[in-house]
C-alpha cells in the first residue's frame, strides 16, 4: 500500500523513518520544504510539494500536525485529489469533534478516516514504540495495521470516529496529573536535602514508580528541560480537554490548575521546554 506522510515535526520525523525502514513509505510532505527535501533524500523516498500531490499518488495518507485547524486545512486540500478508497489516518492530537468533521468530509469523497492519536513522546516516535488509540471502522484499521505497527508497540481500537481522540484526552489529563505529582514530590525531596538520584531510583521501583519519573526525574532535578514533549503543546492539548470536559459536565480541576501553571511558564519564555519544566515552579 503506497503510503504518504504529512507533517515532519519532532514526532513525524521519527515515524517517517520507521515507516521507511519497514519499506512502507512512498513519499513525504511538510510545510517547511527544506525539511521534507532533506528527509526524502535521507530515506530515498519522494518529496511532494503539496498535500494534493501526495493524495493523488498514495493509497494511505498519514497525518501528524499540530492543531485542529491544521488537520482540517490539510483535509480540505486532500479532498481536491483524493481517490475513492484512500485511507487517511490522523495521528495528531485534536478534539473528537474535529475528528468527526474530518471523517464526514472525507466520506463525501468515498475516502475513509481513522483518528489515531499516539502516546510515547519523541522517544517513542524514534524507537517505534508508540501507543496508538484508534477511532473509526475496525475493518479499516485491520487493513492498515501492519503499516501502523512499524511505528507502534501497541494499537487499540477504541470505537467510532472521535473515540481515539477522546481517549488521547484521557491520556493528556493523566499526564498533567503525573507531571504535577512528580515535580511537586521531587521539589519536596530537594527541600528535605535528600540525594535526588537515590530518591528517584528507589521510588521508580515501587508502587509510585512511573515512566515520567524514570525518564524525566534526573533531567528535571539537574535543571535540564529539553523536549520530550513541549510544554506549549501540552497546554494546547489541555485546552481541548477543558472544552471537552465542559461539554459533558466533567470535573476539570486538574486541567485548570495545570493550564494556569503552564501559562505562567509560557509567559516566562519556557513554552518550548519539556513539560517537566513545571519543576521550575514547584522548587
Image (tube, rainbow, N blue to C red):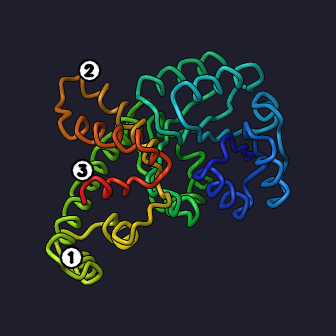
Residue furthest left in the image: 192
Label 3, secondary structure: give it.
Answer: helix
Q: Residue at x 26, y 76 (%)?
A: 200
Residue at the disc numbered 1: 203
Q: Residue at x 78, y 47 (%)?
A: 36
Label 1, secondary structure: give it.
Answer: helix
- Mark 1 or mark 2: whose residue is earlier in sequence: 1
Specify whether 43 is left or right of 224: right
Residue at the disc numbered 2: 247
Residue 78 vs residue 243, the one in the foreground? 243
In 3D space, how far apart are the residues under numbered discs 2 and 3 (Cα atoms)? 21 Å
Residue 234 placement (x, y as % from top left): 41, 43
In 3D space, how far apart are the residues under numbered discs 3 and 1 (Cα atoms)? 17 Å
Q: Quadrant of residue 188?
A: bottom left
Tell us which disc is closer to us: 1 or 2: 1
Is 203 situated above or below 271? below
Residue 185 placement (x, y as % from top left): 19, 64
Label 2, secondary structure: give it.
Answer: helix
Residue 193 placement (x, y as % from top left): 18, 78
Residue at the disc numbered 3: 177
Is 269 situated above or below 99? below
In 3D space, how far apart are the residues under numbered discs 1 and 2 (Cα atoms)? 37 Å
For residue 191, the mark is: none
Specify whether 68 is left or right of 213: right
Q: Mark 2 and mark 1 in contact (Cβ < 8 Å)?
A: no
Residue furthest top in the image: 108
Q: Residue at x 51, y 63 (%)?
A: 123
Q: Quadrant of residue 276?
A: bottom left
Residue 55 vs residue 272, the one in the foreground? 272
Residue 57 placement (x, y as % from top left): 82, 36
- Mark 3 or mark 1: whose residue is earlier in sequence: 3
Residue 159 vs residue 165, the one in the foreground? 165
Amino acid at each position: 500500500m503506497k503510503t504518504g506522510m504529512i507533517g515532519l515535526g519532532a514526532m513525524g520525523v521519527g515515524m517517517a523513518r520507521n515507516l521507511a525502514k519497514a519499506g512502507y513509505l512512498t513519499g513525504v510532505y511538510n510545510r517547511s520544504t527544506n525539511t521534507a527535501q532533506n528527509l526524502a533524500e535521507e530515506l530515498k523516498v519522494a518529496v511532494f510539494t503539496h498535500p494534493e500531490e501526495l493524495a493523488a499518488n498514495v493509497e494511505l495518507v498519514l497525518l501528524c500536525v499540530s492543531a485542529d485547524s491544521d488537520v482540517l486545512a490539510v483535509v480540505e486540500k486532500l479532498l481536491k485529489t483524493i481517490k475513492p478508497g484512500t485511507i487517511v489516518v490522523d495521528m495528531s492530537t485534536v478534539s473528537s469533534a474535529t475528528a468527526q468533521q474530518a471523517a464526514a468530509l472525507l466520506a463525501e469523497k468515498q475516502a475513509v478516516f481513522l483518528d489515531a492519536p499516539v502516546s510515547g513522546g519523541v522517544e517513542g516516535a524514534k524507537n517505534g514504540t508508540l501507543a496508538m488509540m484508534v477511532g473509526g471502522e475496525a475493518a479499516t484499521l485491520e487493513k492498515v495495521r501492519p503499516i501502523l505497527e512499524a511505528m507502534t508497540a501497541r494499537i487499540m481500537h477504541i470505537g467510532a470516529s472521535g473515540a481515539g481522540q477522546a481517549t488521547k484526552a484521557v491520556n493528556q489529563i493523566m499526564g498533567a496529573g503525573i507531571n504535577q505529582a512528580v515535580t511537586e514530590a521531587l521539589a519536596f525531596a530537594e527541600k528535605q536535602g535528600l540525594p535526588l538520584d537515590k530518591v528517584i531510583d528507589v521510588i521508580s521501583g515501587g508502587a509510585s514508580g512511573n515512566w515520567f519519573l524514570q525518564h524525566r526525574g534526573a533531567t528535571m532535578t539537574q535543571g535540564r528541560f529539553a523536549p520530550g514533549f513541549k510544554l506549549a503543546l501540552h497546554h494546547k492539548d489541555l485546552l481541548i480537554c477543558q472544552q471537552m470536559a465542559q461539554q459533558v459536565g466533567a470535573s476539570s480541576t486538574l486541567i485548570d490548575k495545570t493550564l494556569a501553571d503552564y501559562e505562567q511558564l509560557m509567559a516566562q519564555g519556557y513554552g518550548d521546554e519539556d513539560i517537566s519544566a513545571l519543576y521550575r515552579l514547584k522548587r
